Image: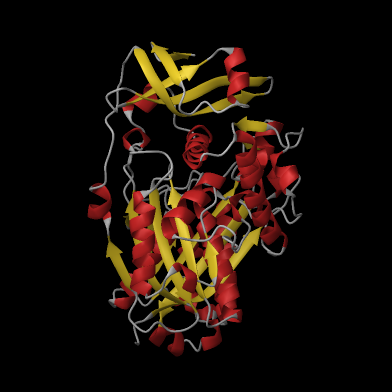
Amino acid sequence: MSDTPVLVGIAQVEQRITDPTDGKEPIELMIDAVRMAAEDAGSPRLLAEAGSVRVIRGIWPYENPAAAVAEAIGNSAAETVMSQFGGNFVQSVVNQSALEIQDGTRDLIIITGAECGNSQAKAKRAGIKLEWQELPGTPDRRIGVDKDMRHEAEKQMRLGRPIQIYPMFENALRHHRGESVEDHLKRISELWAGFSRVAAENPHAWIREAKSAEEIRTLSKTNRPVSFPYPKLMNSNNNVDQGAALIMCSVSKARALGIPEDKWVYPWSGTDAHDHYYVSNRENFYTSPAIRIAGGRALELAGLSPSDLDLVDVYSCFPVAVQVAANEIGLDTSRPLTITGGLTFAGGPMNNYVMHSIARSVELLREARDARCLITANGGYLTKHAFGVYSATPPERPFAHQDVQEEVDATPRREVAMDYDGDATVESYTVMYGAEGPTVGHLACLLPDGRRLWANCEDPDTLEAMSREEFCGRAVRVADHLAAF
């Protein structure tokens, strides 16, 4: 078991500033977090012994941030790595790092990431250009595949923002469940209020004032409609300045460095998979074969069932992401499904959120050493998924990882109609809002032959009705991608 991978150091950092020119930039938050993680492990000297520094790609201009981190910690010889873009990649990088430690390729790896979305938002409002470093260079290695996830049909309709796609998943799930618009909104607002209550008890959360279900679902000046059925308080909160770091090493390295065992948390298993890359090809909008197969396999590899889990953090960019994952994995939605408070309340630092959920899991598992925790991660449009099982108790078997992509790829897919005029059925939809109210409706329609077609609705009266009544399942006439009822 000397090469068993173990997390030994963790850190989470944040900054809250009024003047965006006074704050640190993301690379500085990363360096701070890495140093704090070494202090958390009780072994600052480990920084000079890391064989690899790995950074999760973010919304910043850096070309090789891992090199800057490595130099700052006195370890310029370390391998430099950067992930591709996606909220799944923290867990994916942890999975890959655990495998490399277990096979002896590396014995100590640093993983970090940070975003300054709050600083960026403040600077934009003030008309200020933030002078962040470029950090030129090329990482020694990249983890993941940079894949275009937009079908030509989606590009044709200018679909591609998460706030356009996830609400359509949500409305499809509501229709599948047979809920009314009112009952559905009440239920998901109660789900999100539970997340808010967890955030109120999380010392690292960005919003620590618990919001009630009524506050979350009620439109107001501070809770504007974004895309039906989601108001602002049901969207990921990217307006945060947050960073985090994880330090993983082998058990033998941890012992050599004198890191106390009460700091150790073991990754038991991990999996990665993606659903059909194009939303247009998905069989439906309310299931995820990749979550079902990969999430289930992660538990199977760890020798656990959903009821064996003591702690869970389900990726929570929007309520539908949580519901779909819970349905596919078999998690009871009446139990807490987050340990942080989620991306709305704990904070959604773009691709790096899961580093915060893993760091939080380490804190909690150190306190409850027999507990088992499942972390889920999601990138794209409920597209790319990664899973990890953790415990402070040593695993009975070596860290296990399995590639299940072939199984996912074999699941059904739909064909797409690029152009079609005629009758169809509304599969799902959303209404987008601007400052003055509804602006456009996006619809996914099913044709008589089973193909999927995208269309828009621009009629003001219909847009108003779409936010009050169920339009899924309705007959629609489409001409030149415009829907008429």
* Residue nearest the viewer, comparing 111 with 89: 89
Q: Residue at x 31, y 16 (%)?
A: 419
Q: Residue at x 37, y 21 (%)?
A: 156
Percent x, y of residue 77: 38, 68
* Residue nearest the viewer, comparing 151 with 240: 151
Q: How many marks?
A: 0
Say which quadrant the N terminus sits in: bottom left
Whether residue 83 appears in this view of the structure is: no
* Residue nearest the viewer, comparing 45 with 423: 423
The correct choice, above or below, for 332 with respect to 250 in the image is above
Whether residue 444 appears in this view of the structure is: yes
Percent x, y of residue 275: 34, 46
Q: Residue at x 44, y 13 (%)?
A: 482
Q: Is residue 450 left or right of residue 123?
A: left
Q: Residue 89: name its quadrant.
A: bottom left
Percent x, y of residue 452: 34, 27
Q: Which colour scheme appears in the figure? A: secondary structure
The correct choice, above or below, for 41 with respect to 346 in the image is below
Q: Residue at x 43, y 59 (%)?
A: 329
The correct choice, above or below, for 130 with respect to 396 in the image is above
Percent x, y of residue 241: 63, 51
